[in-house]
Image (tube, grey):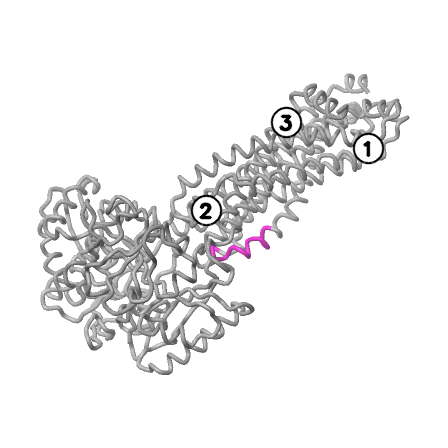
Amino acid sequence: MDDLRFAVRGLLKAPGFSAVALATLTLGLAASAAGFSILYAVLLRPLPYPASDRLVTITGRGISTTRFEEWRQASTSYDAFAAVDPGVPNVDTPDGPERIQSLLVSRDFFPMLALRPTAGRVLGGVDFDSGSPSVIVTDRLAARLFGSAAAAIGREVHLVGTGYVNERYVVVGTIASTGPLSQGVVSLIMPLLPLPRGELCPAIGRLKPGVTLAAARSEATSLAAAFAGRNASRPGAVVVQVEGLQDHVLGASALALRLMFAASILVLLISCANVTHLVLARSVARTREAAVRLALGASRGRLARGLFWESLFLSAGAAAIGLWLSSVAVRALIVLAPYRVPRIEEAHTSAAVILFTAVLALATSLAFVLGPLVSTGRVDLNSTLRSGARQLGGSRRLQWFRSLLVSAEIAVACVVLVIAGLLVETFATLRPSNPGFNPEHKLILRIGNTAARNEDSIALVADLQARIGSMPGVREIAAATDLPLTGLSWVPDVSVGGRQVAGGPSPDAVHVRAVTSNYFSTLQTPIAAGRDLDKTDMAQRLSVAVVNQEFVRRFLPGTDPLGQRVSFRAGRSADDTFDVVGVARDARLSGDSAASRPELYIPFTVAPARGFYLVIETSGDPASIAAQVRSAVHTLAPGAVITGLLTMTALLRASVAEPRFHASLLGILAMLAVLLALAGMYAVMSYSVAQRRHEMGVRIALGADVSDILSLVLRRSLRQALAGLAVGLPAAFVVSRTMTTLLYGTTPADPRSYASAAAGLLLLAIAAALAPAARAARVSPIEALRDA
C-alpha cells in the first residue's frame, strides 16, 4: 500500500509528465485495440460451421450442374460435398419485382454446415426431385414478404430468372442466414435440380480428417484432366481451384486486415518508445531522490516496484481510454467502409479484445520499468549524492540507449510509410485518368427483364432508345449486355486465327459483349482501326465484330486484324463465325486491376439478353433525369427490375473503393507513426541539448560559432535517422513481399515509395533537431559555466 500511495503521489506531482505519457500511450493502445477487434472478428474466430478449418471451396471450369454428382462420387478427399451455385432471380414484393441473391444447393448443404431452420424445415428428400417447388427464405425476406418467419411457411413466392421453367415456389422453411458464405447477402435457397443450368457450379467440401489441402488440390487436378479427356470438343484445360473456405470468403481483405493490424502494433511500439523517453528523463531528474532513499535503506527492488506501479497506473488508464476510443473507431470504420468485409459487423470490444489490451498494457508497464533500471542500474551512490543528476544525465550508456530508441522509431515509421506508399501507388494506378471511355455526363442502369424472352429485349431496347432519347438534355443512349468497370462479361470458348481459347476463368479468356450500334460513340471510346458497328449490322443481324487493342496484341500480332474471323457459340446450337470490322481502344474491364483484357463486341440483335445495361449521355447533370428514366422503363416493361442506377463517375469511384480504403487506413496509421516519431526525436534532442548545456557553453567559450553548434546537433539527429533507415528500409522490403496480391501497377521494390519514405524521415529528423539546435547555439557561456 505504501508503494501504491507513493506511485499515485508521484504521478500527481508531475501532471505534465502524466498527461503527455497518458495521451501518447492511449493513441498506441487505441490503434492496436481497434486493429485487433477487427482482426479477431474477421480472421481469428472460426467460421460458424462444424469443423470449419476443414471446409474448402471448389470452383472453376469443370464442375457444372450436370456434372456435379459425378464429381461428388469420384472425389475421395471429402466426407461431405455440397453445391452452392449462386443466382440473382427477381422476386415479387409489395413494392414490385426486386432482384435478390440466391443459392442453389445440393442435399448435403444443410447437414454439412449444420444450418437450422427458425421456422418450418430445411430442404431434403423429395425437395430435390425434378420439378420441386420448395424454397427456403431468410427471416429478413420472410418479414418483408409475409410479416414474419412463421407466417411464411406454406406461402407462395413468384420467382423469375432462377434458370428453371417453374416460377411458382412454396416456402417450406426459414433460416436466420447462411453465414459468411459469400460477399453478398443471400436471401433465398433453392434445391439444385437435375436440369442443365450453367457451366460453373461452385461447391463446398469438408475434407476428411488427415487429408491436406494440397492432397485435395492434387485430386482435383487429376479429376479435371480426366473430364477434359472425355470432352475433347471443349478447348483448353478443365481448370478447378481448391482453397480454404475462409480464404475464399475473405479474399484480399484478409491480407489487408493483417497489414493494418501489424501497422497498428508498430504505432504502439513508437508510442511506447516515446513514453520510455519520458520515463527515462523523469528517472534522471529523480536520481538524487532515489539515491537518498537507497542511502536510507530502501532496496533497489522497492524502487523498481514503485516505478512499476507508476507505469501500471499509466498503462491501465491508457488502456481504459484506448478501449473506448477503439470501440468508437471500429463502429465508424464499419459504417464508412465502402465495400463489405465479411463478418466485420461482428467486431466489438469483446472479452478477447479486453484481454489482449490488458496484456499489452502490462507488457508496456514492464518495458517502462526495464528501461530506467537497465540504463541507471549501476549508479554510484556517493558520486550521485555529491553531483546530483547531471552525471547520470550525461552518461554515455543512457545517451546510447536514447539514440537506440529514436533509431528504432525511425525504422518502424519507415516500414509503415513504405507500405502506405505502395498502396497509394496502387490506388493511383487503379484510378485511371483515362479509362478508355469518358465517364462524364453518363447515367447507367441495369434492366432485368427476366419475365420475357431474350428476343423480346431487342424491341424493348429500341423502344427505350426512342422514349428516353427524346427527353430534354439526352444526347445519346446505348445498350450493352455488360459495361466497363462492372467486372462482368460473357466469356465463352473462342476460336481465333486457328487458335482455341478457353473461356471461363482462363487468363486469356475473351470477354464478349453484345452492344447497340451507338455504344462506342455514347461512351466516347475511340475506334483505332476499321469501323464501328452500325444500324445495318443491327437490322440485318450481321455476324460482324469489333475487337479491342488487347485482343489484337494477344491473338493477332503482326497481322491486319480487319477481315479476320472469330468463332464461338453466340446462344445458338452451333458456333457462329464473326468477321472483324473494327478495333476499339482498350477500356478498363474492372476496378481492381489495371490490366487490359481481350474483348469482342457483337451486335445486340445477334445475341440479345433479358438483362442488359443502358448508358445515357446527357448535356447536364445525369442524375437529374434518373426519375424520368425509371418511369419510362416501368411504363415499357412493368415487370422489369432496375438495379445499379447511378452515374458513371460514381461507378468509376466505386470500382476503386477497396484499394482507396486500404490506402487511406494505412495512410492514417503512417501519419500517426510519423507524428509520434517526430515527437520522439524532438523530445530526445531537446533533452540532450539541455543535458549538454555546460558542454555547449564551454565550446562557445573556446571559439565555436553558431554553425558549429548547429552542425553538432544536426549531425547527431541525422546519424540516428540514418541508423533507423538502415534497418527500416530492408525490413519494409521484406514486409512488402507479402502484399503482392494487394499491389497493381507497382512492385514491392518500387523505388519511389522507398525514396519518398527515406527522404521524408530525413527531413523530419532535421526539422526535429532545428529548434533544439537553435537553443544550443544561443547558450550563454557565462551562464552555462556558472550553472555547472
Q: Alpha carbon of mark 2 to alpha carbon of mark 1: how far? A: 47 Å
Q: Which residues are magenta?
A: 732-746
Residue 420 versus residue 383 in the image, above or below: below
Asked whether, in this view, residue 568 is left or right of residue 704, the answer is left
Q: Amino acid at mark 2?
A: His
Q: Earlier in the sequence, mark 2 or mark 3?
A: 2
Identify which residue is drawn at 47% across, 54% down: 47
Asked whether, in this view, residue 338 is left or right of residue 295, the answer is left
Residue 66 versus residue 637 in the image, above or below: below
Q: Where residue 591 appears, x then y in whole percent?
A: 36, 53
Q: Alpha carbon of mark 3 to alpha carbon of mark 1: how far? A: 39 Å
| Dominant secondary structure (helix, strand or loop) of the stretch shown in magenta | helix
Q: Where residue 144 appears, x then y in whole percent?
A: 26, 45
Question: Any magenta on residue 177?
Answer: no
Which residue in the protein does label 1 denote? 301
Q: Amino acid at mark 3?
A: Ala
Q: Where residue 739 appears, x then y in whole percent?
A: 51, 55
Quadrant location of the C terminus in the rendered image: top right
Q: Where residue 671 appears, x then y in whole percent?
A: 53, 38
Which residue in the protein does label 2 denote? 662
Residue 18 versus residue 174 in the image, above or below: above
Which residue in the protein does label 3 denote? 771
Asked whether, in this view, residue 366 is left or right of residue 55, the answer is right
Q: Amino acid at mark 1?
A: Gly
Identify which residue is drawn at 63% across, 27% down: 771
Q: Earlier in the sequence, mark 3 or mark 1?
A: 1
